[in-house]
Structures are given as C-alpha cells and as structure tokens.
Amino acid sequence: MASRIPRLLLAIAALLMLFAAVMHALAYRKADAAVAVSNLAAFFGASLRTFWLNDSAVTAIVAAICILLVVRPQAASRAVILLLALIPATIGVLLYIFLGNFFAAPFMLVVAALVFAAGLSWPKTAAQIS
C-alpha cells in the first residue's frame, strides 16, 4: 500500500498549483492590456498572450496529474513522479533567471520540492501500491 505521506505531499502540491494557475489566468487581463498599449510587433504580442495562458494551462495540468496520483497511486511510477517535479522546478528557475526574486519563483520551487519529495518516498514496485 502506498504511504499516505507522498500522497499528502502531492495533494498539497496540487492545491498550490491550482491556486497558482487560477491566479495567473486571472492576471491575463492585465497582461493583455499591457500588450495592447505596447509597441511590440503583433507576432510577439500574440506570443506573449499565448505563453501567458499556456503557463496557466500547464500548471493546471500538472496539478491534475498530481490529483490523479493521489486518487490512483498505481497510475505512475517513482521515476515518472520525479520527472513531473521537473516541470514546476523549471518554471521556478526560469522565473528567477528572467524576473529575479519574484514571489512566484520560490513558490514554484516549493511545489517542485513537494512533488520531488513525494517521488522519492513513492513505493519502488507496483506491488507496494494500493
């Protein structure tokens, strides 16, 4: 049977990511307004809008995968969960690189750490998963 601790870690990570995805999507209007009054070429403005919503969608999808693993822990292996942690980790690192010490960067790194810790404590074999 899968321990409750890694599933709890994934549940916390999922809730944090859902919160982040919703807040980021809600901020789209401000980003859209900023692009509308900028002197960005149309392609780059459209790209920014696309990537803004893409980030919200990816974060929500990773949250959904974590929720799936909480409910059906046999759906993924330890390796897959460890790889899943790379998504919020990459987002966090890129935020630090391009925005500096912006609050979302450590937020995403905390989420990545939760998912990574869940992966490290995930059962090694399918027989150990309930």
Image: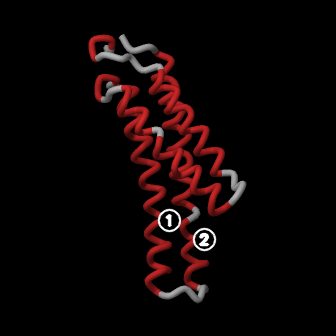
Which quadrant would the N terminus be assigned to in this image? top left
Measured as percent of width and height from the top left, residue 47 is found at 45, 74
Within-10-Å neighbours for mark 1: few <14, some 14–19, many 20+: some
* Percent x, y of residue 3: 44, 13
From this view, report whether residue 94 is shown above or below residue 17: below
> What is the number of callouts on the image?
2
Q: Nearer the viewer, residue 49 or 27?
A: 49
Question: Residue 82, labelled with which disc?
Answer: none
Residue at 58% over, 50% down = 92
The quadrant in which residue 74 appears is top left
13 and 80: which is toward the camera: 80
Above or below 106: residue 81: above
The amino acid sitting under disc 2 is Lys
Instruction: Give the side of residue 106 with respect to residue 70, left or right.
Output: right
The secondary structure type at the circle numbered 2 is helix
Q: Quadrant of residue 50?
A: bottom left
Residue for point 55% across, 46% down: 19
Label 2 close to label 1 by CB (< 8 Å): no
Q: Quadrant of the C terminus?
A: top left
Callout 2: 10 Å neighbours few (<14), some, many (20+)?
A: few
In this rendering, would 109 be left or right of 68?
right
Colour scheme shown: secondary structure
Amino acid residing under circle 1: Trp
User: Earlier along the polypeptide chain: callout 2 or callout 1?
Assistant: 2
Q: Residue at x 52, y 27 (%)?
A: 117
Is residue 121 shown above or below 37? above
Q: Which residue is mark 2?
A: 30
